[in-house]
């Protein structure tokens, strides 16, 4: 088997693609022949040693994969050899073969191609937890998505629309925002060019029920000023590089809540609940209410190019690595 490996923390170009021995499974694990791996923003931070998870080199990055089960441990009852699955892990996905606990392995939704399933768990799982588990979004509510042009953002647009919310997608690039419109956003706002509050007034959406924030910084602070009574802000990421100091008085005045989401950790603490979320997402997929897609596919051995592409912000949504 082959793996992409970090031998020393650094930039994507320090990654190596090497041949490695196949490993033995334990009683509760499954061995999967990987079809494709999802690429995430967190992978860049992990290989630099700047993520919450700080594995010691040498290690392979990668939070999610899809593939076919080729072996199951003695105590595994929920999966069998031949099943098409997607798995999540804290790192270690950039390999042609992985061994994963069976509880973190889920059936691929019916009729979903493996190349799509590889990039589905983290973005759609995170967006679903943010909107449903945390914000408890209701039909007819108004939702702002900050960082709507990224993988999690696009998933959040689709899910919020499928649940009957009105969606305002916010990003910093007009071309990318056009894609958000195609994915179903009711309105788009470029927060680099315009003042968020003014734009909300222009589209007659002065008060917002739910904010899903992947960006942090000034956009987050601006959105808090527009929260409605009982509004909910879900903190998902800080892609702007700035962690906002959230003004508690604003939350108090609107009887509002700020909620943190660390989906990767949640998924390992509550694997069964995440499995239920995937079943619900699978139903939305079956009914064609969500339509996950990949922006670009790279080969596993070119993982460095994929990560540089993400770093240069060229992606609109998901990138995956195919094992060929
Ligand atoms: N809490 C969790 O459990 C969890 C789970 C998944 C992801 N995340 C985090 O959520 C964030 C988004 O993840 P993703 O997978 O959607 O990433 P992605 O596909 O790479 O998208 C990144 C998004 O961030 C925006 N962005 C990038 N750099 C920026 C900057 N300097 N200033 C403002 N906006 C910037 C991009 O917008 P434009 O290029 O359009 O401006 C794009 O919308 C990341 O920080 C990631 O670590 C958290």
Image (cartoon, rainbow, N blue to C red):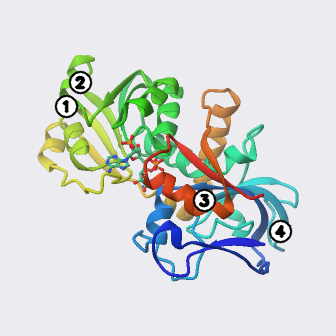
Closer to the observer: label 3 or label 1? 1
Q: Is residue 186 left or right of residue 259?
A: right
Residue beneath disc 4: 72
**Can you give x and y, in whole percent of width and height, for residue 34 in the image?**
75, 60
User: CB of mark 3 within 8 Å of CB of mark 1?
Assistant: no
The mark that comes first in sequence, 3 or 1, is 1
**For residue 288, above or below residue 26:** above
The local crowd at label 1, few if under 14, some if 14 to 19, many if 20 or more residues have their Cα within 10 Å, is few
Residue beneath disc 1: 195
Q: Is residue 305 left or right of residue 1?
A: left
Residue beneath disc 2: 199
Closer to the observer: label 4 or label 3? 4
Res. 206 visible in picture: no
Residue beneath disc 3: 271
The mark that comes first in sequence, 1 or 4, is 4
Closer to the observer: label 2 or label 4? 2
* Tag 4 secondary structure: strand
Residue nearest the viewer, comparing 266 with 178 = 178
Alpha-carbon span between mark 2 and mark 4:
54 Å
Q: Is the N terminus in the top left, top right, bottom left or bottom right quadrant?
A: bottom right
- The residue shown at (78%, 77%) is 25
- The residue shown at (56%, 72%) is 15
**Can you give x and y, in whole percent of width and height, for residue 173 in the image?**
37, 35
**For residue 158, above or below residue 140:** below
Residue 63: which quarter of the image? bottom right
The local crowd at label 3, few if under 14, some if 14 to 19, many if 20 or more residues have their Cα within 10 Å, is some
Alpha-carbon span between mark 1 and mark 4:
54 Å
The local crowd at label 2, few if under 14, some if 14 to 19, many if 20 or more residues have their Cα within 10 Å, is some
- The residue shown at (43%, 74%) is 49
User: CB of mark 1 within 8 Å of CB of mark 2?
Assistant: yes
The mark that comes first in sequence, 2 or 4, is 4
């Amino acid at each position: 088997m082959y793996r992409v490996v970090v031998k020393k923390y650094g930039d994507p170009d320090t990654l190596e693609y090497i041949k490695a021995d196949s490993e033995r499974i334990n009683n509760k694990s499954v061995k999967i022949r990987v079809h494709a791996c999802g690429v995430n923003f967190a992978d860049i931070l992990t290989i630099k040693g700047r993520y919450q998870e700080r594995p010691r080199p040498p290690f392979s990055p990668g939070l999610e994969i899809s593939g076919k089960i080729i072996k199951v441990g003695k105590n595994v009852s929920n999966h069998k050899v031949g099943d098409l699955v997607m798995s999540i892990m804290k790192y270690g996905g950039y390999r042609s073969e992985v061994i994963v606990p069976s509880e973190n392995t889920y059936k691929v939704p019916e009729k979903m191609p493996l190349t799509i399933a590889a990039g589905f768990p983290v973005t759609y799982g995170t967006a679903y937890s943010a909107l449903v588990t945390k914000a408890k979004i209701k039909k007819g509510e108004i939702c702002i998505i900050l960082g709507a042009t990224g993988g999690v953002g696009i998933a959040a647009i689709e899910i919020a629309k499928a649940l009957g919310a009105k969606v305002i997608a916010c990003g910093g690039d007009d071309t990318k925002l056009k894609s958000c419109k195609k994915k179903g956003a009711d309105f788009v706002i470029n927060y680099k060019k315009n003042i968020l509050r003014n734009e909300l007034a222009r589209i007659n959406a002065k008060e917002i029920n739910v904010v899903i924030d992947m960006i942090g910084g000034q956009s987050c602070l601006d959105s808090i000023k527009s929260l409605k009574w009982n509004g909910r802000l879900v903190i998902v990421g800080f892609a702007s590089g700035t962690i906002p100091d959230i003004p508690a008085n604003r939350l108090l005045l609107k009887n509002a809540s700020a909620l943190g989401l660390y989906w990767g950790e949640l998924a390992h603490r509550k694997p069964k609940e995440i499995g239920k979320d995937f079943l619900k997402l699978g139903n939305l997929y079956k009914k064609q209410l969500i339509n996950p897609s990949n922006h670009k596919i790279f080969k596993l051995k070119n993982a460095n190019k994929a990560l540089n592409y993400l770093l240069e912000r060229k992606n609109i949504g998901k990138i995956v690595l195919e094992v060929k």
